[in-house]
Amino acid sequence: MLSSSTLVHLSPVDLVIIVFYFVLVLAIGLYLKEQANTGEDFFMAGREMTAWVAGLAFLSANLGSLELMGWAGNSYKYGILAAHWYWIGAIPSMLFLALIMMPFYYVCKTHSVPGYLKLRFGQDSQALSSISFALMTVLMSGINMYAMAVVMKVVLGWDLNFSIIVSSVTVAIYVALGGLRSAIFNEVLQFFLIWAGALLIPILGLIEAGGWSGLKLKILHNLTEQHAANPGAYTHLWSTLGNFSDNPMGINWAGIVFGLGAVIAMGYWTTDFLVVQRVLSAKDLRSAELAPIIGAAFKMMVPFIVILPGLLGLALLRDGSGNLLRLVPADLAWSPAGQAQGLHGYDEVLPLMLARYCGPGLLGLGITALIAGFMSGMAGNVSAFSTVWTYDIYGALINKNATDEGKVRMGRWVTVIGVGISIGTAYLVMHAQSIMDYVQALFSFFIAPLFGTVILGMLWKRATKAGGFWGLLAGTLSSVGMYAWGKLDPSSVRYLALSAQAQDQAQNMFRALWCWLICVIVTVVVSLMTKPKTDAELKDLVYGLTPIPKQGHVRWIQSPIFWGAVVAIVFVILQIIFW
Amino acid sequence: MKSGGSLSIWFFIGVSLAVNGAVIFARGLYELAYPPEHQVVLYNLHANVWWGAVLLVLGLFFSLRFSPARERARMAAEKS
């Protein structure tokens, strides 16, 4: 099971902590089996979650271990610019979901986002979005599984097959037994484990670096020594975004604000069913509105355990001889030549910092946090896949007369099958690495146009069935087309991302922006040429035609709007502090 | 949170934090008595002792506050 060359070595104490985690999640699944008998129980967790539980699960479903290690690596590569993905790339859209969109999702009592599209635009749009979502979700789950197994091999020396089989079988058991409720319980548990396992790194790192000002000085010194371009840009959030060439990402403020904040983030946080499903499990509308606000409050703090360790790595990491340690791209680090030279990839910065400060016990907790992050991310994918398959494909297209009991039975089987397909994908990727790039890109293609379709459906009653379908199709196809153009002709980046210096992330931002615009324009044009639904048909689906249920007497301190405003103010203050 | 039974999610979290905290705290005390040969950076701060203690206390608080007995009593009070 173990290879000789690994980043960290686990002691028996660490193994006790890891094994205890596996025992606990299986025990939770077994315990919750008795409470997952109906469709509402299995797929919607009985719609009885409090705002806190739904909010933490909403955040945790996104807080997978690849997310943690990947963004720590990105902050090492791009500096504090990576924090945009946690702040402007999350907070405004989470608040928008809570205060504007959630009433529509909640009032129409849909089981899924494709389910809303069926009610609003008809079965064609539902079929297009549900098949794409189901396919992409299960493929992404497998690709994440493979990537995590590779990380476990590099960091711990664990065999790829061992990591894949043990983690996926555990996820299959606890989700098939307890459904969404089991997935949510484990996501909340994971949230606490991640903070317990990762919080020491920034605390001890800041002590070692001499606080924030000491950290900035060390980064400036190290990058100047390495002749990096714009060394001062690594610790500024906005002041270097005036020009593409002034920052390490090769992006400008328009790409961040419109591409990331207005399209990609809005699309992901408001229409990706993987995260929206958690909020739909809330016990009432006020809890459903508060859940994303609670998630946003904690999301704002995540850079402390993700972005800061990456910056600390830039400032503090040295090799055995005391020289600065330079991390490199993963494909170079994990190649046989890179391994022979002892190179480390950007994504290894978090485990490197973990190994730097955490001895036996603490190291086990940190590794458990990474494993828990991976498993809950996979559980999120599998539970969302199971719901969309059962309600939007099986129930809508294959067996329209399926009973509730039949749907639960189907949900359990599809959970196991979904894990099986994920395992298959993981092994497929093992033999064809380039598939990983394409499928990850395909997943991102789908989210931006879907947001265009859903938001027009909710806010513009004139949008028609044909407009919704053709807009979604045009947005998705144009995104695929732009991606293919970029691959076939790399120089096209100067048109697609407005700058020849645009890095991968900058290209993603602009591609999302363009395909969203195409989706919106096509939807509007086709809608204006086709016959709209009547107001009566759009009741409970569209702004202005949906009576929002009264929440009774709620004190201002319990009001979602009040807490949304608090989160928005803190968000603005953070932007100013790190400007 | 209603879980359909008498065990709350917060109870599971409490148990997890308490067990992990106890193990890490115990290991920290052991290292105080027998310092390891290979020490991590900032070993002198003994993070495993105080961080383990923090997790243990937090875990015990959640475990007791949301214990099955308390949850059953709370659910009975809600019904009546």
Image: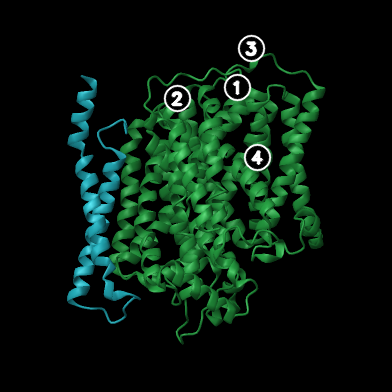
Image spot of residue A96 (x, y percent): 55, 36
**What is the spatial separation of the Cα atoms under label 2 and label 1, in whole angstroms?**
28 Å
Figure chain in green: A
Q: Nearer the viewer, residue A202 or A174?
A: A202
Dot 1 falls on which chain? A
The answer to whether residue A179 of the structure is visible from this angle is no
Q: How many marks?
A: 4
- Alpha-carbon distance for marks 1 and 4? 23 Å
Instruction: Judge left or right: residue A54 versus residue A75.
Output: left
Q: Nearer the viewer, residue A430 or B9?
A: B9
| Residue under label 4 | A132
Give the chain coloured cyan. Answer: B
Looking at the rendered structure, the kind of residue marked 2 is Glu
Q: Residue at x 64, y 12 (%)?
A: A536
**Residue A48 spot, x, y in % from top left:** 38, 29
Chain label for disc 2 = A
CB contact under 8 Å: marks 1 and 4: no
Please give left or right for residue A566 compared with residue A439 in the image: left
| Residue type (three-letter) at the residue carrying disc 4 | Ser
Q: Tell me the crowding category of disc 4: few under 14, some 14 to 19, or many 20 or more residues within 10 angstroms, Cα based.
A: some
Q: How far across and down, in percent of the image, does residue A444 sit?
A: 65, 48
Question: Which is in the foreground here, disc 2 or disc 4?
Answer: 4
Amino acid on which disc 1 is placed: Leu
Q: Which residue is mark 3?
A: A536
